Image (cartoon, rainbow, N blue to C red):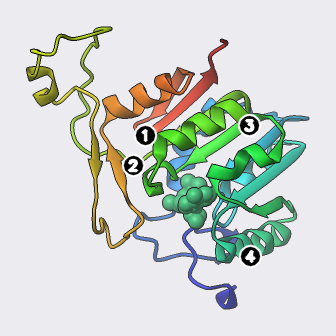
Amino acid sequence: MQELGEWFHNLDLNGVPTAPAHFLGDYPNVQWTQFACAIPEDLQGASVLDVGCNAGFYSIEMKRRGAGRVLGIDSDPTYLAQAKFASEVCGNPIELRCMSVYDVAALKERFDWVLFLGVLYHLRYPLLALDLLHDHVVKDSLVFQSMQRGSRQIDPLQHDYSFDETSIFDSPGFPKMHFVEQSYSHDPTNWWVPNRACVEAMLRSAGFTIEAHPEDEIYICRKRSA
Ligand SMILES: C[S@@+](CC[C@H](N)C(=O)[O-])C[C@H]1O[C@@H](n2cnc3c(N)ncnc32)[C@H](O)[C@@H]1O
């Protein structure tokens, strides 16, 4: 386990924790327990794509719920090696591929459930990623999470505004994305941090309907039919 580098996911590998000193606690278990009930207990026969799977925590949980095909993709081979090791030790081996979210069209396959958790704010082109997921791999459901900062207020939005209307941009509930030029939380890959209104507006804009919001940062979405 130690030879595979520093772990971000705290997994229980036969009683050995992989990241016991995680700065977010028993992560991602603390988050999963908040929304596990929003995903069917029985995923028998369902296909799952876990985008930015890291060490495979969520992929393994989907396997445990009976999902047939679970494919985890991540752009970092170090995390994929951890996911391979962890899923095998847990007895739930998952299929893994080193791939960026920007390349999902190459999969030429749609999945019943697509997990896109904790990746959006690491991207320089976040809306492009959502569009690509919608257009190429989501068959029905998207489970989404993003770090959020700023106001949690949500303003009702009009279809259009006149050029003279400038005050809406100062309202805390208007969709806003904060750009991090250097680094946030010691992580230079934290590029964009949306407020809540922005997360919801982006999901809608990419063609998703928000069906459930079981935890502050988690959204269960359905693909909107054209
Ligand atoms: C904060 S971790 C989230 C891991 C996991 N999805 C979770 O919610 O616990 C972000 C993960 O996204 C991966 N990632 C970053 N940019 C990516 C990209 N362009 N395509 C695919 N994965 C990416 C990172 O390597 C990392 O494993």
How far apart marks 1 and 2 lie (CA) works out to: 7 Å
Residue at the spot 37% in from the left edge and 70% down from the top edge = 188
In the image, which disc is placed on residue 217?
1
Q: Position of residue 67 (x, y in %)?
A: 85, 42
Q: Which quadrant is home to the C terminus?
A: top right
Tag 4 residue:
81
How far apart marks 3 and 2 lie (CA) works out to: 23 Å
Tag 3 residue:
137
Is label 2's Cβ within 8 Å of ligand 1? no
The disc, 2 or 4, on the residue closer to the chain's N-terminal end is 4
Report if residue 14 is visible in the image: no
Tag 2 residue:
147
Per the image, label 3 sits on a secondary structure element best described as helix
Foreground tag (3 vs 2) = 3
How far apart marks 4 and 1 lie (CA) works out to: 28 Å
Mark 4 residue type = Ala
Q: Position of residue 64 (x, y in %)?
A: 81, 49
The disc, 3 or 1, on the residue closer to the chain's N-terminal end is 3
